Image: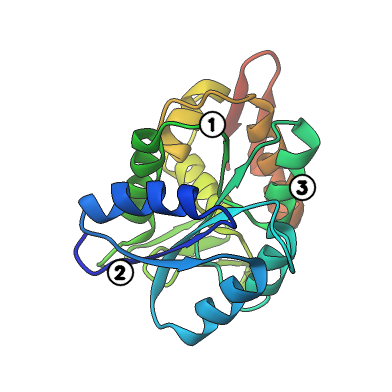
Amino acid sequence: MDGTKILVVDDESRMRKLVKDFLTHQHYEVLEAADGEQAVDTFFAEKNIALIILDVMMPKMDGWQVVREIRQYSKVPIIMLTAKSEEKDELLGFELGVDEYISKPFSPKILVARVEAILRRSGGDTPDVVEVGGIRMDKSAHAVTIDGQSIDLSFKEFELLDYFIQNQGVALSRERILNNVWNYDYYGDARTIDTHVKKLRSKMGDKGEYIKTIWGMGYKFEV
């Protein structure tokens, strides 16, 4: 994607160079930040940053606080990099609005594949409005209303609801949801799905009942 801007944030220059080299090879424009404060300043100073790759442990301001700052103003997709792989860290990231979570060490090729998948799914060019059961999704505007009231969804929650609506009445396993919504073979815990579904149901209010649990398998969206 020529000219697509990606902000890479890591206090290790070696890690920034590794990620930048792979992304630049794919014709992305890569911006760098060495700490959390610089990351926030760069994000708001630059125009049209399409995605952020963000380390957790950094000086001055850690990755969690960077996400909090940016999420007040933007739904830009964020991939978190961390040396930790504890479930509580992943859950915190998802609660704050992180879209992907990759533990170090990782394959740069896998990182690039995830970047491409996110940008491909978030870059719709044509208006695409879907209405069902009082839910209205405008994919081009990345907006959802329920009975005329706007609800605030993260990037991944929006993608998850879109996938459910596309597959009304179909029993979906957690693995199938992960492979289609996250758009890669997910090597983490399928409980990631449960966390996102719980948050999505909560935001949907009464309409959250459309997402039905199929015990021992996954979920099904029925109006």
| Mark earlier in primary sequence (3, 2) | 3
Q: Mark 3 and mark 1 in contact (Cβ < 8 Å)?
A: no
Q: Mark 2 and mark 3 in contact (Cβ < 8 Å)?
A: no
**Gap between marks 2 and 1 measured at Cα:** 39 Å
Percent of width and height locating residue 94: 68, 48
Does residue 26 appear in the picture of this structure? yes
Query: Residue drawn 33% across and 63% down?
Result: 128
Q: Amino acid at mark 2?
A: Pro
The quadrant holding residue 10 is bottom right
Say which residue label 2 marks: 127
Number of numbered discs on residues: 3
Q: Is residue 178 above or below residue 78?
A: above
Query: Residue drawn 23% across and 69% down?
Result: 3
Say which residue label 3 marks: 92
Percent of width and height locating residue 175: 52, 22
The quadrant holding residue 38 is bottom right
Percent of width and height locating residue 217: 62, 16
Question: Is the residue marked by circle 1 packed among few (<14), some (14-19), or many (20+) residues within 10 Å?
Answer: few
Please tell me the numbered disc located at residue 105: 1
| Mark earlier in primary sequence (1, 3) | 3
Query: Residue drawn 77% across and 47% down?
Result: 92
Q: Amino acid at mark 3?
A: Leu
- Left or right, 117 with respect to 189, comes to left
